[in-house]
Amino acid sequence: MKLQLSGQREDALWQSLREAHAAYYAQLNQVRMDLGHVISLFEMSARQARSLTSAGFGTREEALGSLQASVRHCWYQQCLLRLSVPRDQSARAEEVNEALSAVMHAVHPWCAERSAGQRDTQETWARVQENMALFRSAIDQYADEAQQWLAEPRAVGWHAPSP
């Protein structure tokens, strides 16, 4: 009976690790989609962007608000992940969130320039692209490592490491 309960506990702990990684990864992808939406609306002229609101694309401001909410939720998910997984795994997630912060610090000035009608935004756009590439790379590394961590066989008597 004790062995069965121990096995059930280990499975529950393992499942919580999987769920924590999955929730964080899903939120990262939501941020990527919201970033793409913001960028697409700000790449076009303000008049073009306004014309799309009636088609359900929302305003630039709504898109930025949605992105900000997604980013906040991503930080929240990373905090939950930190409580659920070993330190080395949560450290990789912290690196991803640092890359996300860099993207946001690049996106905001670019959006401000585009909102002001500036046409020469090449310098800030280059920073957005550079930081987006680093963010995508960090997400890919996180996903690859999470797959490896979750694919590792559990030894008999395995217990989730303390964070």
Image (cartoon, rainbow, N blue to C red):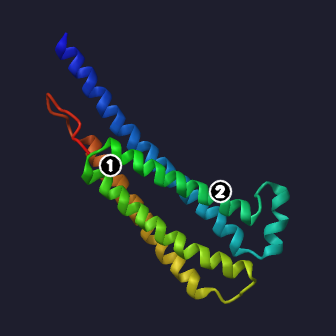
User: Along the line of sight, which residue is nearer the eye, 15 or 104?
Assistant: 104
Where 121 falls versus 83 (above or below)?
below
Q: Quadrant of residue 92?
A: bottom left
- Which mark is first along the chain, 2 or 1? 2
Left-right relation of 57 to 30: right
User: Along the line of sight, which residue is nearer the eye, 76 or 148?
Assistant: 76
Residue at 69% from the left image edge and 74% from the top image edge = 43
Where 100 falls versus 149 (above or below)?
below
Q: Position of residue 160 (x, y in %)?
A: 23, 36
Q: Which residue is mark 1?
A: 146
Question: Helix, strand or loop at disc 1?
Answer: helix
How many labels sit on residues?
2
Where 21 falls versus 13 (above or below)?
below
Q: Position of residue 51 (x, y in %)?
A: 85, 66
Q: Residue furthest top?
A: 1
Q: Quadrant of residue 135?
A: bottom left
Where 163 falls versus 100 (above or below)?
above
Cα separation between marks 1 and 2 = 27 Å
Q: Position of residue 83 (x, y in %)?
A: 34, 44
Left-right relation of 33 to 59: left
Q: Amino acid at mark 2?
A: Ser
Crowding around mark 1 (Cα neighbors within 10 Å: few <14, some 14 to 19, many 20+) is some
Q: Which residue is mark 2?
A: 66
Quadrant assignment for the C terminus: top left
